[in-house]
Amino acid sequence: MSEYFRKYIKKEHYANHYSNLKFKTSFRNCILEAFKRRLWKETEGDDWDIMWAEKEWIHEVLDHTHLQSNQKINHFRNHYELTRKDLMIKNFKRYKKNLEREGKQEEANNYNFFPLTFHLPSEYPIFFEEFKRQSTNSDTKTAWIMKPIGKSQGKGIFIFNKIQQISQWKNTLRYNQDNPQAEAYIVQKYIADPLLIGGKKFDMRIYLLCTSYQPLTLYLYRTGFARFTHHRYDSEDISNTYVHLTNVAIQKTSDNYDEKLGGKWNLQTLKLYLMTKYGQEKVAETFYNIQMLMIRSLQAVQKIIINDKHCFELYGFDILLDAQLKPWLLEVNASPSMTSNTPVDFELKCGLLDDVFTIIDLEKVLTGNEEQIGGFDLICKGNPIKLPINSTFTTYLGAFNNRQQQLKKIAKSTAIRLAQTYQESQTKAIEIGSKGQKEKEEKDKQMRSSSKGPQVMQNGGNGNNKPNNLTKQNTIIKRNTTNLPALGTVQNKNNIKRQPLQNAGQQQQQNQQSQSNSSKKNNPNEDSMLSANQKLQKLTQESKINQFQPYKQQSQYNEVMGMGVVSRNLQKNEE
Amino acid sequence: MQQLDNQEILMKLKSSKQFWDIKKKIKQGFNDQQKIGVNDIQKFAQSCEIEDQLIKLISHILKKSKKRETLKEDQIEFLNTSKIKWTELLFKNLDIVHQKTKNQEEDDTNTDSKLYIYDEKNLLAFLQTFKQQQHSALYQNVQFQSNKLLNINIPLKSSQQILDKYQYLLLQEELQDEKINKIRKQIENEHLDIELEKIAQTFVPNGERCLLYLKYFEFDHQETILQQNFTKLQKECLNQLFYDELLEIDGHEISEDTFYFVFQEQILTCLKCFIRDKTIKENIRIQLQNGIKKEQTEFQLPITGFFPFKNISKYVAPLCYLSTKIHIIYALFKEFFCRYFCFLHAISSENNSILSLCMQIEEIISTHSPKLFHHLKVIGCDTLKLIIHQLVYCFVGDMDPPHILTIYDQIIGHDSLEILVILCVGFLNKYKSKLLLAKNYENVQQIFQELREDKFQELVQFAYKQ
């Protein structure tokens, strides 16, 4: 939680202290709560630093307003290119065609995660041909689903398998006098063999944060939901929407809606179920496919979306698994619901938003190269971040959400780094003040620049790109090798030796020590400055390694993944 | 035991896949030879272990043909009379429950959801009465003063034997992918009980568990039959029974469990079919209640021969993690109940019975952790009262589903419920330090009300901790 940042980072070390920050929002749900928890102040005026606006506001206002350089807003100008059902499909189709034209057939084939879709009424003739073809080719009637483009939360959706059912719709809506602009719909081939759990259909809501389209920067949240319908699935009965639609908004109106559990599983429980039923490999593959599906969706609109450094966006992806565990994209929401229906749900959403705010980094304390921030993992920066092939993980989606521990670590290492840069700037100021000691200054500079070398990425402002990338790659490897005690390549073994499993606790202690060290040595004392600096640098390097440990240990992974055998080391540790 | 003649054995042999595999192997071995003598085959068979496999296969077939009789009479006479008393008691409870439901219909405001014929506490309380009975029966004999809740003269395995049997679990290590894949293939190709048990004893990879269970129960080629049977039972469910209501109430608890609420409907369907299944009476390994017709009571025992009890849903729930097909879940549940879980509700001196298991636990705790045992006694919360819930319901609700399924593996692997003894001992040891600080029953309850997470491997470790 952000409270770790408040706890560890000294007030004077903030580039922009949290007490100066102001937010504006019209939402009165988890969003307001998450803002308040960061101790930011609410404002009604235009002096906000961050605004969580409804998407309609963006359309109306953003084009005519000049934003200050520090202001952040939660939508991109033309987000609808991805989040409106018809445009999304159009963009996917177009991108796929482009790939084919460029000869990238293999990548084009990957764009197979959306069902056959037509825009109505404009594509009605093509649809009609397809409908006839489908119904003559197969014995069973193919079902199609109609979705009104402008509506959300499952409103206006219906399923049909006879063309008469749609001609009726044509008469009532398209040619209705009161409705001069015929309401646009999309019609999609209905995925008839969804995976059923407990005889019930479900879909997944997964959260993806995009902070930039150039370079494409994406963070994937580890926790999401599986939302169940409350009635047993029946492919025959297509008129009962309770059976087919998983939207909470729809299920809430059902008679046997369970208030307490909200008809949801979190992604970890779902993964545990799937692992138990289908085994680890199959499920790992599925979750990796989901992650790639999300990256590909954004890649498809990357050139279309107007990039803007003021904007970020938290997308809610709705994904369905079919009986073969293949993921299908149903839609992308630009403003996923931040209203909670259970206390657990409330905490989850507040945590999610808190992590979003940490990544947006209005306080300007992070380097921007962090691999994991809270429950978010960086999955794309320019290019998708690939984990090593022999990694236990293919994606962190649905893995144990260790955001509390992770934020604690990151807050500590950040505090150390900030204290160090603060000291440096202080010394500089003092040195500039006493011009007489030129000799000493030169010495200092030499010492400092030589010790700066190995940790370029610490100083975000460094213009040199190549070493920056290198260190980043290293850290990626480090992060994953800690999960792989069994697959010991030489490199791995070194890492394991340095960080044996049972040492997790010790490392934390070490961290705490280094933290207290740094605060002790904070007093600007010119004589001890150099040695203190060097020590600090060493400490930061150590703590950096810690920072990139996404899982406390393998056994924690087992916990989530539901493997019966649990590493004993950890238990000793916990006792 | 019914004897098979040679012809029948050959018939059964031919119906097993392994037989044809062996035949193929022999054929391959004599590929280029024209004349093959019986001696040649014998030699060849000996040299490449085919003979061994054949012997195993035949003994397997013989073992399978021996149908297990349902245990009706116990060798200890007073347990037989106790069973009759237990049944009478339950009939009385049934009357009370029935009266309550009637009252509820009249008065909607007073809905008591805790309607059940008996729960694990009733069962333990009944077992406790044995002590006094035996005392009075053996009044003249010198009895040692015992602190144990249950101290009955039944033949017991030595508790050390049980501890030794499961000690190998301590050395369980994480397996590498290669090894796991090998086990997968083994499960796919294996048909022999003994071999399947061996796999279940050590490690069953996720994703293969359902297949292993089905093979072990010999359901692997019977899916259509299972489905037909289930559909038949489902049709019978249209006729409402009084017990249906109790089962529905029972499902409420499971619906509050995050892991299982999704399956509430399936679980209920399974149980409704279960109490209508005529085949259970002949398949169940031990008779649970002695079905005497009582003319005063409005109701008779269900067709299964025993009353549904509180939390019966818990036995079905973890199995929902194995298959999306409800007839498979049902078949597995039925087999698990008839073979194993029935003993947890049986008044009997059998090794697996609740009585034996309880006494084993008391024995181990009183000898290995006498301090804890004594302390619990002093604060009026006997050891058994503490763990009876976990014991009777196989830790369902206390551990995550994959861990529960590991327990199920072990039950199959050893064809025994003794793993529960180990886990209960481990459970008590795990919370030992906290329990020793407890001053009364409320304190103890507080300890277990706190959020806790128990794991299979962890409890095994604790069980062997001194």
Image (cartoon, rainbow, N blue to C red):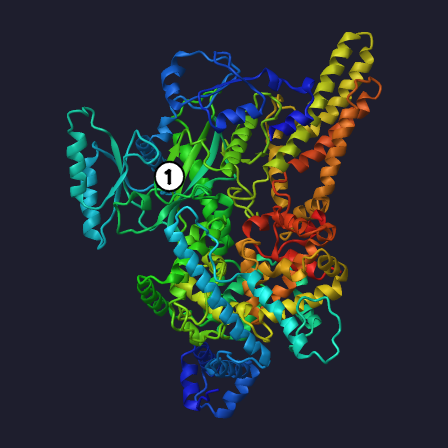
Image position, residue A366 (x, y; %): 61, 26
Q: Give the SS element for disc 1.
A: loop
Judged from this view, the residue extending furthest toward the right is A527
Residue A333 higher or lower than B132, as above or below = above
Q: Is residue B48 left or right of residue A319?
A: right
Task: Between residue B402 and residue B37, name the one nearer to us.
Answer: B402
Q: Residue at x 43, y 54 (%)?
A: B249
Task: Between residue A279 and residue B51, name the one nearer to us.
Answer: A279
Q: Quadrant of the N terminus of chain A?
A: top right
Disc 1: which residue? A252
Residue B348 higher or lower than B97, as above or below = below
Task: Between residue B74 and residue A402, name the one nearer to us.
Answer: B74
Total labels drawn? 1
Residue A306 higher or lower than B65, as above or below = above
* Whether residue B156 is visible: no
Q: Residues within 10 Å of mark 1 (few under 14, many from 20)?
A: some
Image position, residue B139 (x, y; %): 70, 78
Image position, residue B227 (x, y; %): 35, 65
* Whether residue B413 is visible: yes
Q: Is residue A426 left or right of residue A103?
A: right
Image position, residue A14 (x, y; %): 65, 19
Q: Quadrant of residue A303?
A: top left
Q: Is residue B238 left or right of residue B134?
A: left
Chain under disc 1:
A
Residue type at the position of mark 1: Lys
Q: Is residue B50 left or right of residue A486?
A: left
Residue A518 higher or lower than A235, as above or below = above
